[in-house]
Image (tube, grey):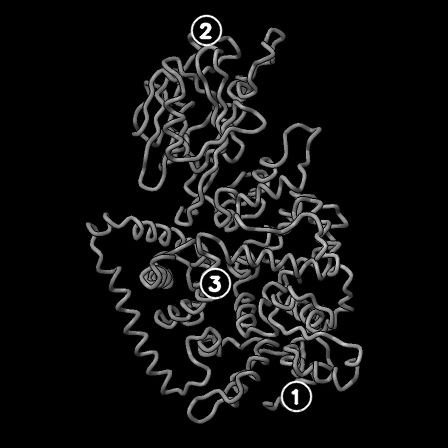
Amino acid sequence: VVYEQEGVFIHSSCGKNDDQDSLIAGILRVIEKENEVVVDWRPLDETLDTSNILCAGKDSSSVVEWTQTPKEKCSRGADRPSSYEAEWDMVTTVSFKKKPHSNGDAATHANGESKWSFLFSLTDLKSIKQNKEGMGWSYLVFCLKDDVKLPALHFHRGDSKPLIKCLEKHVALNESPHDERVLLVKTQKSLSQSFENLFDESSYGLLQKWKKDPYIVTMGKFSKVTNYIVGSLRSSDPSNQRRPPSEMADFLNDTIPGLKINQQEEPGFEVITRIDLGKQPEVSRREPVSAEEWAKNMDSEGRILNVDYIKRLIFKGGLCHTLRKEVWKFLLGYFPWNSTKEERSNLQKRKTDEYFRMKLQWKSVSEEQEKRNSRLRDYRSLIEKDVNRTDRTNKFYEGEDNPGLILLHDILMTYCMYDFDLGYVQGMSDLLSPVLYVMENEVDAFWCFVSYMDQMHQNFEEQMQGMKTQLIQLSHLLRLLDSGFCSYLESQDSGYLYFCFRWLLIRFKREFSFQDILRLWEVMWTELPCQNFHLLLCCAILESEKQQIMDKHYGFNEILKHINELSMKIDVEYILCKAEAISMQMLNCKELPQTVSEILGIENSPVTPDSDTGEDESAAELSCPASLYQSISTPVVAANGTRDGSQQAAETQSLTPA
């Protein structure tokens, strides 16, 4: 207990402040726990049984449960002072309920005062409203991040300043620019913080924690951030329902320092908006690479004969599932493409020894040692929470005491030994889960995961440099593709594309079904047809939804809600076709802006009038990365998702390595 104050009252009457029977005396405490700091108020005569404290379920960010109690309502009297605070209305019109005991019996007390008890974590605190000095005894109101206002607490003995000083040791409190009585919470982001309470909620009304931690928010439903961002940027005054883009820029720049996506078009963008990319070509896909095709491209010692060719096949059709366990090791960089079977076998032996040496490091840490290693404790705590809710509907991970869950846990703990600076950040279990599912082997899954994390490392670093860079790059690509849509998003305060944050953070893991993610990832790992193909996948999804968003005049809230509801409804083959078509548009553009060329990793040679000949065009095509996959001529699934009979017949064509 770091703060304790008696004589803190709740006034439960309907404005009859002189009626002592309407005052509920209590004790207010601030309590430091292992992983959080909580604020606790309860009546003086309430027992210390913590099961009596108002709290929500373990995985819910809603801190209090309440229902309207008609008999406690009272009409607003004519004699009520005009300065009567709005938060009193809540006290007179709602009754707080007890959280049921585990045996199902609700906790009750004869005097009924226990219904006012409450407890909340500081991570759920949004703001504190205080009364002005010289207005009787001090009182304050806690407002939580799901827009629940707790009953006003009146300090009959002393004032609230010591409490504020105590809270400032744990959270940053800034005076609201709109109301000097309001202190806004500005929590510093820490990637080691728990992501608890953000996974299992489905309702759209809950306020969440974008500004506190974008990583936390994007792991939950995108709509959860809606009320928070809107509430932070838009006044409750109906006459001022929109904030200027510059204010939105200030807000998000504070959230992700260094994120520079202009709300107004700069001169450099004017050139982009005039570029005609031409019509998107029709693109089709082929059947997955078969075991026979893979074997034909391997010599007697196990070397891959033509790496580019096999990558093109995988890009155009993916892999049949029986091949994934072997081929993913090449795609992720665990196995060198030019290695022999014997070399790979020796590599696995060395990597097995190395893995179990690292695993032994955390396995051999005693309880006493771990008590003195807070970071390891935090990593273990986060991993245990996340493992228990990662892909539990998949047969590989479902049920209690599932060996798949044990492997998931052990690999993530061992990765903390491999990269202790990064350790574990939520989202990493999402990246490991499909890899372990495919490998069905602890050691192979670990080293494939290590290779994948080498690609994704910047996404999880505390400075978020990888996420900042990708959001800016995505903005450039989308503006080139459709400047009108970009302008519309900006007009709705959505030009920062923060609704794509989760897509980028864990590579669409929660947007597609588990089997579709296997296909999507192996296609992306080919690194064809250009670098940053995953950004073109984002463009493809957004372009597919553009018409509905614009035709229905979706605003800030509706855009977040709509994008969130796309989860598990996106056709992976259609989006792959569309993203490939967009890449062909851009790769074949002779006036591609330098910025876009750098994002896609292509050389942008200047075009001269004399170069407009068939010979030069042919040479340009050969030098263009798009030619790497345009030679594959066995399409099956068209861009519109249909199967073409003539194309299907083309499957019989032989594909000879170049």
Element marked by disc 2: loop
- Please tell me which of labels 1 and 3 falls first in the chain: 3
* Left or right of residue 447, residue 636 in this image: right
**Res 178 → quadrant:** top right
Q: Position of residue 570 (x, y in %)?
A: 63, 60
- Please tell me which of labels 2 and 1 falls first in the chain: 2
Q: Label 1 sits on what residue type?
A: Thr
Whole-number angstrom distance, CA of label 1 to CA of label 3: 38 Å
Report the quarter where the C terminus lies.
Answer: bottom right
Q: Label 2 sits on what residue type?
A: Asp
**Residue, disc 2:** 19
Q: Label 3 sits on what residue type?
A: Met
**Where is 114 relative to 372, above or below?**
above
Q: Nearer the viewer, mark 2 or mark 3?
A: 3
Report the quarter where the N terminus lies.
Answer: top left
Q: Residues within 10 Å of mark 1 (few under 14, many from 20)?
A: few
Element marked by disc 3: helix
**Residue, disc 3:** 456
Q: Position of residue 292 (x, y in %)?
A: 53, 87
**Residue, disc 1:** 652
Q: Residues within 10 Å of mark 3 (few under 14, many from 20)?
A: some
Question: Residue 410, which numbered label?
Answer: none
Which residue is at the front of the view, 203 or 311? 311
Element marked by disc 1: helix
Q: Residues within 10 Å of mark 2 (few under 14, many from 20)?
A: few
Whole-number angstrom distance, CA of label 2 to CA of label 1: 90 Å
Which residue is at the front of the view, 441 or 314? 314
- Please tell me which of labels 2 and 3 falls first in the chain: 2
Whole-number angstrom distance, CA of label 2 to CA of label 3: 62 Å
* Left or right of residue 601, residue 460 in this image: left
